[in-house]
Image (cartoon, rainbow, N blue to C red):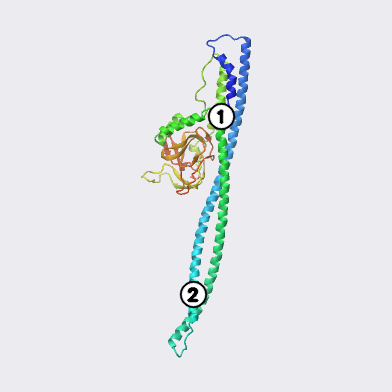
């Protein structure tokens, strides 16, 4: 809800508050002041109701996003399984074709030998006894070959039938893969719509959204390393944005109730309930960290990397364009390009941990926004070769920690 109408309501009130020195008020002035106070209170109640409804809308959107992300991951796994099956079918199809060619060649060779033998009648035994004996032996051999010919033709017929079956299976699996890709694309479009709605809802109630994004971009430009960036975010970025209308109304109401008082409201408001209720990552969350994207872990914590360094996190290889979800509840601290990391997303938990994700093609969230575990926060690039790779890191006080300690099933 936009606060423009609130500023209009405060114009008469501002004139009263600018008195240079305390003075006594007449009964009429006190009545007018009380009427204004009651008006502000009613506006505050309306805004609190709107804020509550906005919070309910965000909660509903988060549930829809998590549900959509789960369905999207299921579709991705189906598509990946179809791709693997298709590769296996095509391999078997190639082997069947090779076997068919070999069997055909063998059968053709046997038939050619039979044809040659049929064109050479054996000579009379009295005229050429040696040649006649050789012809008799050849006839005996050819008689033994007949069962082999029958076996070869039967095998050839079986291989032809298997080849046709495999070709049909490949076509059917291609159709299944295309259908899975189509359903996945529709689900990802739904996720993007929900993400846009949640972001608009967040920006509508956050007075610091744009300023916070600018501050985070400035910090990212000044920081040289990821550790510097995390330290800067820890010291400068607020845990939760202020609520736009409510802070202004509360300040005006406090001034109205005591006309001579001119102190400002606190600059750093308390954490919002949404942030206060976020699930921590500490010892109680061991085994509760979700894998942010469907795929296989290509490199683990401590594995050797090119250049002689060791991995300080996990490297996950998903399918191209896979959806990325928040591994745990938290607040987005950074969502932008950063040095060699490319697109970098940093999520802070309520107990001081930082989840670092890099290598994605798109980022959905914005600094200051709260996210729930399983909620989509980005998408991998469409690049298929080389395959995309997502990097996951867990840090505490700037020090990398093994993510496998918190991973589900780890």
Local SS, label 2 = helix
Q: Residue 397 at what x, y percent from top left? A: 43, 34
Q: Residue 232 at what x, y percent from top left? A: 43, 31
Q: Nearer the viewer, residue 393 or 93?
A: 93
- Farthest residue, direction left: 308
Name the residue carrying label 2: 110
Q: Quadrant of the N terminus?
A: top right
Residue 161 position by quadrant:
bottom right
Local SS, label 1 = helix
Q: Which of 59 and 36 is in front in this view?
A: 36
For the point 56% across and 35% down, which residue is it? Answer: 198
Going from N to C along the chain, the mark reached first, 2 or 1, is 2
Q: Classify mark 2: residues with Cα within 10 Å, few (<14), some (14-19) or many (20+).
A: some
Distance from Cα at disc 2 to Cα at disc 1: 85 Å
Q: Residue 314 at what x, y percent from top left? A: 45, 44
Location of residue 296 with respect to 111 vertically, above or below: above
For the point 48% across and 80% down, which residue is it? Answer: 117
Name the residue carrying label 1: 205
């Amino acid at each position: 809800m936009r606060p423009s109408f609130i500023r209009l309501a405060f114009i008469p009130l501002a004139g009263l508050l600018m008195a240079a020195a305390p003075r006594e008020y007449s009964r009429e002035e006190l009545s007018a002041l009380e009427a204004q106070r009651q008006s502000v209170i009613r506006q505050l109640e309306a805004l609190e109701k709107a804020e509550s409804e906005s919070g309910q809308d965000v909660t509903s959107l988060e549930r829809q996003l998590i549900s959509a992300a789960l369905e999207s991951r299921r579709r991705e796994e189906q598509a990946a399984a179809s791709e693997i099956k298709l590769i296996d079918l095509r391999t078997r199809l190639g082997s069947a074709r090779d076997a068919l060619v070999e069997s055909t060649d063998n059968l053709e060779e046997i038939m050619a030998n039979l044809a040659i033998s049929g064109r050479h009648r054996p000579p009379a035994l009295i005229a050429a006894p040696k040649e006649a004996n050789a012809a008799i032996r050849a006839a005996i051999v050819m008689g033994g070959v007949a069962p082999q010919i029958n076996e070869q033709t039967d095998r050839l017929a079986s291989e032809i039938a298997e080849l046709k079956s495999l070709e049909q299976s490949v076509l059917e699996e291609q159709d299944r893969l295309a259908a899975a890709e189509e359903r996945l694309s529709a689900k990802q479009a739904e996720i993007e719509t929900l993400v846009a709605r949640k972001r608009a809802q967040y920006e509508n109630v956050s007075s610091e959204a744009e300023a916070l994004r600018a501050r985070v971009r400035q910090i990212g430009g000044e920081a040289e390393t990821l550790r510097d960036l995390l330290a800067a975010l820890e010291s400068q970025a607020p845990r939760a944005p202020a609520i736009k209308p409510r802070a202004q109304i509360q300040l005006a109401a406090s001034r109205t109730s005591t006309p001579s008082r001119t102190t400002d409201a606190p600059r750093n408001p308390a954490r919002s309930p949404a942030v206060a209720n976020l699930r921590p990552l500490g010892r109680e969350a061991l085994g509760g960290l979700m894998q942010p994207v469907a795929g296989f872990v290509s490199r683990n914590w401590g594995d050797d990397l090119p250049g002689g360094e060791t991995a300080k996190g996990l490297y996950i290889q998903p399918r191209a364009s896979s959806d990325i979800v928040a591994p745990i509840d938290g607040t987005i601290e950074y969502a932008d390009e950063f040095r060699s990391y490319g697109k970098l997303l940093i999520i802070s938990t309520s107990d001081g941990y930082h989840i670092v994700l890099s290598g994605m093609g798109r980022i959905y969230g914005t600094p200051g926004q709260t996210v729930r575990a399983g909620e989509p926060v980005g998408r991998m690039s469409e690049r298929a070769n080389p395959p995309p790779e997502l990097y996951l890191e867990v840090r505490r006080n700037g020090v990398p920690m093994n993510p496998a300690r918190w991973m589900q099933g780890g």
